[in-house]
Structures are given as C-alpha cells and as structure tokens.
C-alpha cells in the first residue's frame, strides 16, 4: 500500500492512496501521531481495508513528510561507485555513516531554504528506508522485518559547511528543509524489488541524476543490519541509502542551487516531489 500524511502544518492526518491515486482518509482507523503507526502489522491491517469504504479527501491538499516523529536520520556516505569517483571520495570496505538532524525533514513539496552565507547548496536523490520495528543487532536475513516502508528523499547539502568548516558532515546536512521526504510511504510488498528502483532528479527541468538502486554498493538489508550494530534503530528512524552520481559538486565547474531554482525528484513506484529554493 501507499500511505500519506496530509493537511496543514500541525493538523496532519493519515491517508492512503486508492488505485486511482486519490487520497482516502484513514484517521478513523490509524493514527499517525505516534510511532505505532509505522508498525508493519498495523500498516498491513490498514492496507486490507477497502479504499472505497474510506472518505475521499479533497484534491489539492498539502502532502506532508510521511513520518511525523522522526527520531534520527542516518545517512550513508558514498554508496554508488560513480558518485564516489565523481566526488573524489574513497569507497571504504564498510559504509560511511553520518547523522542528519531530524529537524531537517520537510514535506515533499515544501520549499528548500538556502541558509544565510550559503554558496554551495547541492542536491542528491536517495531511496529512504523508514524503520517500523526496533532493530538492534539484527541479521541481514531478518533486517527487512523491521522496515515500515520506503520513500523518496533529497539529501540537500551545503558543501562548504560540510567540507570546509571543520568537524563532521552534519554541519552541511542539517539546515531546516534539507531533507524533503515523500510523497508516499510505500510498503515493501507494494514496492516490489527495492534493488531495481529507478531514481532521478531534475533542476529547472534539466536531468542531473538518473540511476537504479541496483547500483548500490551496500544493499538495504545489509545497511539496516550494519547500522543496528552501532545504534538502536527505532520506529520513525530513517536511513538515507546514498545518492548516485550527478550531484552539483561533481561538475566542472560545480553547479549549486540558487533562489528560484526548482528541484524535482522521482523514483519508480515512489511518486515525485517538487521543491522551490528560497533564500532565508
């Protein structure tokens, strides 16, 4: 199933998409206000409801990030060979991890804020994994049992904050709105093969990134298992699985976002998001 959260800020409601891509209200059956909303069994039960029996939501409502309470966002460094080569990063034998502030998350069509003093704001389409069950020291074989679903992410980064201001990558990753998520939370059974999702990203209508998750160096089950060795993963946590080649930093000369640019992101079975860049 494809689940959404919709409505004005502070009064978001849960919904699901029917076969005609119309939003149906789930608020009588499922609350999106707590992490229990993401339990795979609860989502499966909601998915067995007849969409036609649920109230139809008016068209044009605002779509929100599909997870209300995000505990943490765990990012994975170079996870596509082309991205690593273009950025001059070394591919390590183990995944490189970083944390992105949960407050960076925003809705799929919300505006991307360009921070004060920012000059090198970059883009990065990613497959995001949403955790639905607590995971600690889980095996690769058991990892997918802990997944609520998948969603689209844009790992927005201010490169000078990340690479030239000292310290950890989190500085360049964590500004408000630097993690547009959504539009949908797609359950594993509905997404099909998560190793064969085509991802793409356009800036002002020009294709910048286009790749398949088949090109990941470290696959989703391994990432969940690996991360759970170092930190407990809880419902509502999000794993950003890495971005393919084509980020702005990789161009010669580099290309970065400016006020008025529009970033459009899409993925097979995951829908699309569109964000206007604005100066703070």
Image (cartoon, rainbow, N blue to C red):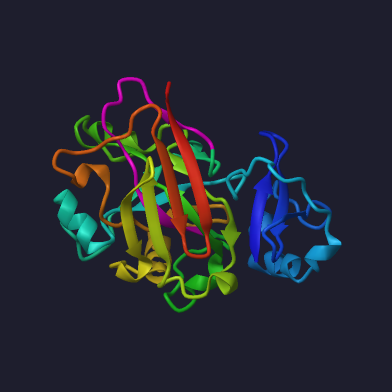
Query: Horizontally, is 176 left or right of 222 in the view?
Result: right
Looking at the rendered image, the quarter that the N terminus falls into is: bottom right
Q: Which image quadrant is residue 253 in?
A: top left
Residue 79 picture location, percent across and down: 28, 60
Q: Which image quadrant is residue 18 in?
A: bottom right
Residue in view at x 54 percent, y 50 percent: 182
Q: Which image quadrant is residue 211 in?
A: bottom left
Residue 221 picture location, percent across and down: 42, 71
Residue in view at x 75 percent, y 65 percent: 46
For the residue pair 80 and 229, the one nearer the viewer reads as 80
| Residue 47 in sight from this viewpoint | yes
Residue 165 picture location, percent across and down: 22, 29
Looking at the rendered image, the quarter that the C terminus falls into is: top left
Taking the magenta stretch, the answer to whether it contains residue 111 is yes
Q: What is the span of residues highlighted in magenta in the rendered image? A: 110-129
Query: Horizontally, is 18 left or right of 170 in the view?
Result: right
* Residue occupying the far front of the picture: 205
226 in relation to 115, above or below: below
Residue in view at x 33 percent, y 59 percent: 210
Residue in view at x 79 percent, y 68 percent: 49
For the residue pair 156 and 91, the one nearer the viewer reads as 156
């Amino acid at each position: 199933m494809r689940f959404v959260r919709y409505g004005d800020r502070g009064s978001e409601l849960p919904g699901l998409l029917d076969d005609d891509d119309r939003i149906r209200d789930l608020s009588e059956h499922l609350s999106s206000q707590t992490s229990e909303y993401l339990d795979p069994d609860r989502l499966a039960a909601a998915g067995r409801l007849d969409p036609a029996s649920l109230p139809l939501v008016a068209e044009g409502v605002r779509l929100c990030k599909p997870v209300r309470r995000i505990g943490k966002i765990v990012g994975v460094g170079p996870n596509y060979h082309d991205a690593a080569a273009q950025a001059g990063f070394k591919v390590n034998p183990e995944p490189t991890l970083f944390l992105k502030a949960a407050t960076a998350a925003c809705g799929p069509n919300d505006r991307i804020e360009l921070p004060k003093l920012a000059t090198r704001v970059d883009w990065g389409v990613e497959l995001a994994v949403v955790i639905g069950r607590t995971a600690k020291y889980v095996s690769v074989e058991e990892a997918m049992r802990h997944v609520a679903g998948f969603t689209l992410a844009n790992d927005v980064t201010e490169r000078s904050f990340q690479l030239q201001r000292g310290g950890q990558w989190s500085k360049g990753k964590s500004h408000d709105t630097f993690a547009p998520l959504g539009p949908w939370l797609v359950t594993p059974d509905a997404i099909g093969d998560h190793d064969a999702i085509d991802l793409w990203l356009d800036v002002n209508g020009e294709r910048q990134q286009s790749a398949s998750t088949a090109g990941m160096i470290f696959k989703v089950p391994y990432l969940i298992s690996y991360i759970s060795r170092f930190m407990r993963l809880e419902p509502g946590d999000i794993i950003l699985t890495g971005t393919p080649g084509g980020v702005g930093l990789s161009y010669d000369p580099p290309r970065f976002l400016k006020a008025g640019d529009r970033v459009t992101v899409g993925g097979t079975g995951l829908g699309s998001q569109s964000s206007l860049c604005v100066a703070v």
